[in-house]
Image (cartoon, helix red, strand yellow):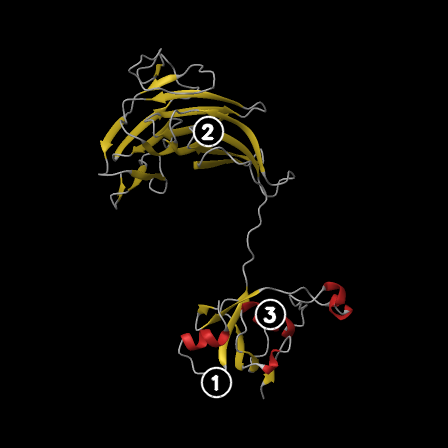
């Protein structure tokens, strides 16, 4: 016996028989409905089918053209409706049932089997910043679980670094973005951003930024309750084209902070990032930045430059024949102190390499 289901006087139009089955992987007996065929309008789509399933589950069903004031009070005790998605021949149903069945060359002499499952609800925004004057080209997030907060760092086409405070999900503070500060760091668009904790004994955040103006910089952010962004170091002698990628990593078993960067021409550089524990008297210590001559690369910053150092690369190589679009550190390969970290680079030359 076939049950006829119609809404809004659609019973006068053409109908098609369908049977519903719960999609594989949905182990919820409360969502199961009888699989006997029912007749529905042939042009019915996802929302109409979802209303039918909710009706069969004895849940609330509200038609789009019905007003809440005219509804019967009988539905008040029912559970709220669940939005469903549907598969016909293992494909998402986005057109009328008959059109989809004919497109899949299914016979209409038998009931069309339709699988259903709860639809994924669209994400809801919990925070939004103001509109900025230029494109946001890169960003990096560092979380501090002990402080129940995170720092979001973004780079823009206007050469500015902007910092935002975020709250961890289960924190008492509502989720959202809180503007901390911003600075004009480069004279050209920022292409890449990377952030990392400076030291386990230090609550400073390191921020690396690479730009189309061929400059690579690191800033530090003191997180002792009073946020202060300061220029930490300028990295020279490694790249002679736009900096397109950068990534931090600590050397395993040591407190040395390493940084890898890639440029538009496929050049790869490795740097030792100066920290508060570095001694200026050692052989490997970076040199303090001197007054720049007109021939040197121009660096723009609205931050007071205190103890700014100029760093030379520890290693350079022509890694790719084109732009290095991404760099990551392979942590799995350095499980012991004696093992060395690996760097993985991706490029526009259609290749991925491990170093």
Residue at which label 3 appears: 31
Label located before the other in sequence (3 or 2): 3
Label located before the other in sequence (3 or 1): 3
Q: Is residue 174 left or right of residue 100?
A: right
Where 36 falls versus 159 (above or below)? below
Q: Quadrant of residue 121?
A: bottom right
Q: Is residue 324 left or right of residue 117?
A: left
Dot 1: element:
loop
Dot 3: element:
helix
**Image position, residue 292 (x, y; %):** 34, 13
**Image position, residue 9 (x, y; %):** 64, 78
Q: Quadrant of residue 269?
A: top left
Where 127 falls versus 161 (above or below)? below
Q: Is residue 128 left or right of residue 275?
A: right
Per the model, the C-alpha gap separating discs 3 and 1 is 24 Å
Residue name at image x 35 percent, y 19 percent: 298
Dot 2: element:
strand
Per the model, the C-alpha gap separating discs 3 and 2 is 50 Å
| Residue 78 visible in rendering | yes
**Image position, residue 113 (x, y; %):** 49, 78
Q: Marks 1 and 2: in contact by CB < 8 Å?
A: no
Residue at which label 2 appears: 161
Quadrant of the snapshot with the N terminus: bottom right
Residue at which label 1 appears: 110
| Residue 27 visible in rendering | no
């Amino acid at each position: 016996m076939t049950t006829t289901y119609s809404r809004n006087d659609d019973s006068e139009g053409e109908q098609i028989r369908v049977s519903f089955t719960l999609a594989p992987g949905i182990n919820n007996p409360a969502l199961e409905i009888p699989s006997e065929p029912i007749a529905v309008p042939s042009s019915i789509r996802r929302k109409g089918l979802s209303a039918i399933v909710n009706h069969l589950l004895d849940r609330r069903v509200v038609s789009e053209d019905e007003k809440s004031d005219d509804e019967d009070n009988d539905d008040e005790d029912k559970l709220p409706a669940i939005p469903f998605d549907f598969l016909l021949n293992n494909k998402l149903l986005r057109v009328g049932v008959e059109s989809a069945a004919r497109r899949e060359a299914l016979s209409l002499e038998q009931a069309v089997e339709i699988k259903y499952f709860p639809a994924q609800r669209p994400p809801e925004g919990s925070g939004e910043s103001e509109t900025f004057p230029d494109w946001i080209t890169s960003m990096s997030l560092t979380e501090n679980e002990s402080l129940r907060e995170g720092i979001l760092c973004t780079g823009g086409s206007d050469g500015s670094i902007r910092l935002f405070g975020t709250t961890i999900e289960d924190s008492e503070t509502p989720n959202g973005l809180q503007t901390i500060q911003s600075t004009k760091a480069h004279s050209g668009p920022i292409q890449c951003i990377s952030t990392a904790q400076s030291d386990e004994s230090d609550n400073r955040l390191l921020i690396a930024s690479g730009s189309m103006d061929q400059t690579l910089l690191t800033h530090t952010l003191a997180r002792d309750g009073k946020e202060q962004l300061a220029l930490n170091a300028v990295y020279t002698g490694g790249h002679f084209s736009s900096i397109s990628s950068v990534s931090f990593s600590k050397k395993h078993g040591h407190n040395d902070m390493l940084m890898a960067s890639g440029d538009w021409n496929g050049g790869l550089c490795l740097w030792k990032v100066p920290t508060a524990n570095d001694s200026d008297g050692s052989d490997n210590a970076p040199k303090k930045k001197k007054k720049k001559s007109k021939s040197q690369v121009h660096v723009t910053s609205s931050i007071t430059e205190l103890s700014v150092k100029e760093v030379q690369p520890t290693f350079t190589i022509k890694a790719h024949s084109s732009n290095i679009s991404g760099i990551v550190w392979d942590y799995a390969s350095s499980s012991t102190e004696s093992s060395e970290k690996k760097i993985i680079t991706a490029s526009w030359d259609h290749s991925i390499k491990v170093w």
